[in-house]
Amino acid sequence: MLPEPAHRNVIVQLFNWRFVDITTHLSRLRAAGYSHVHVSPPQKSNERVWQWWGRYQPVDFSRIEGPLGNEAEFRAMNVEADHVDIQIVVDVVANHTIDITEMPEPDFVRLSGNMIVSEHFPQFEPTDFHPRCTVSDANPESVIPCWLSGNLCDLRTETPHVRATIRDYLRKLASLGVDGFRFDAAKHIEPGFFADVLQDLPNAYSFGEVITPSPKAIPDVPVLDFYDFPLAATMKEAFDFGGNLQLLRDAASHGRALEGTRAVTFVRNHDIDRGQAGDRGLDPESQNTFGIGWRGLSAPLAEGDIVLAYAYIMGLEEGLPYVFADMIGDGVDDRRRDVYDDPRLLAFIRFHNLSLADEGGVARRPDIWLDIGSPNAIAWQRGTDRLVVINKAAEQLALRDLGKSLQPGRYIEVVTGSQLNVEAGGRVHELNVPGQTAVMFVRQQP
């Protein structure tokens, strides 16, 4: 039998879930092995837009209210999270406010030329916004001061007043029990902003969103970890038809992933999911870079690639794994209904948690990469008592004399419960891995 993990270290995004629904699921999330829950933006937002992206159009940072719930429900969610030892991470939208093409009421924002001349935000004045211009990645000078899509009112996050407003909002969230923050559109905010607004919250876990395939494009912000979009791009390439899984072997050292100590590793998030639904997420060009399992609009989603990619991130020593769970009852044909309790995913999470530092009395289990001579498979040890093999090919993978330094004994596979014998000398005499399958073995304690 596999032991129960003593520790947990996995985030789940409950995308656009109401606070009361999250509250009812928290005990099950803890039992499933999750340590953190990422909730959607809770501040008063543009309620004219009932769809999910309305939550990403802040109106009033002093109020917790809207389609996801009110402040009392938000506080109750945090109380229950503390009770079951789950940390709540809140999505923070500090770069911008509303989309002027979807204003909550006529003349909520008025422009003269490219300047806001009047607005109805309770915490801001027209001078708190940058002049209107459109962000273009081809023009680096536009990335921070210009408006996303040319329509989202861009805050002057470099100014003391805007920073003080966001700092007060984060303090309010912390007073309600929040443990950390995910900063939306972090690429479009100057790096010095984050240390300033987090200065009173040194124990909060925070990470940011910078959508790029290049680790070099991630800013140096000591107070933030970041989504590992570079690794997602590498996994997309590696798991694609004709791709080479060896690209994933120690990917960070080859410039294909973030260093694991600052990486939130993920397979899908709401931008990817919504893009595949044609519902205001990443556009098809970006899906071609980051959309694991994506073959274009006319092709079915290769869900096997998604499952194997989750096995990969749960098998790594470093990085904080992140799972996407889709919003409830939206009725959109999003090509895949992501859930937090898929049985294979739960088994991968169990492996991850059983491989954390100090599990079973082992200080750490570094990745030890194995040579198996196939572009369609990858294998590695976690220290000397864990083993991972991923086979993306349709055909069975037949391995002989596998391993470098595994401890001898009987190992249990986390998904199927099948057993594997490791012989004296640390070798596996024979292991057959079915096509499109990941196997993750844990040594049975004597």
Image (cartoon, rainbow, N blue to C red):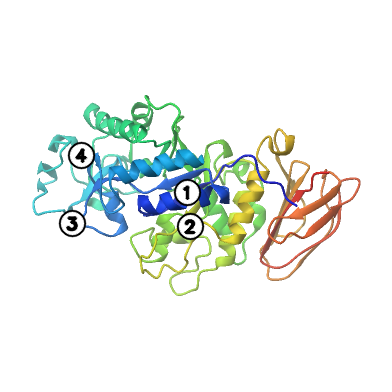
| Other-residue count near label 4 (Cα within 10 Å), few / some / many at <14 / 14–19 / ≥20 | many
Q: Is residue 201 left or right of residue 10?
A: left
Q: Earlier in the sequence, mark 1 or mark 4?
A: 1
In the image, which is nearer the foreground, mark 3 or mark 4?
3
Question: Quick one: label 2 or label 1, which is nearer the N terminus?
Answer: 1
Q: Residue at x 25, y 59 (%)?
A: 50
Compare residues 234 and 19 and report the one nearer the observer. 19
Q: CA distance from mark 2 to mark 4?
A: 31 Å
Secondary structure at numbered mark 3: helix
Q: Amino acid at mark 1?
A: Leu
Amino acid marked by disc 2: Thr
Q: Contact, CB < 8 Å: mark 2 with mark 1?
A: no
**Left or right side of 2 for 98:** left
The residue positioned 50% from the left and 73% from the top of the image is 300
Q: CA distance from mark 2 to mark 1?
A: 33 Å
Q: Residue at x 29, y 41 (%)?
A: 95
Q: Earlier in the sequence, mark 2 or mark 4?
A: 4
- Position of the C terminus by quadrant: top right
Mark 1 vs mark 4: give the one in front. 1
Residue 31 appears at what percent x and percent y?
A: 57, 49
- What SS does tag 2 mark? helix
Q: Earlier in the sequence, mark 3 or mark 4?
A: 3
Q: Which residue is mark 4?
A: 130
Reply above or below: 395 against 210: below
Residue 101 bears which disc, if any? 3
Residue holding disc 2: 289
Residue occupied by mark 1: 26
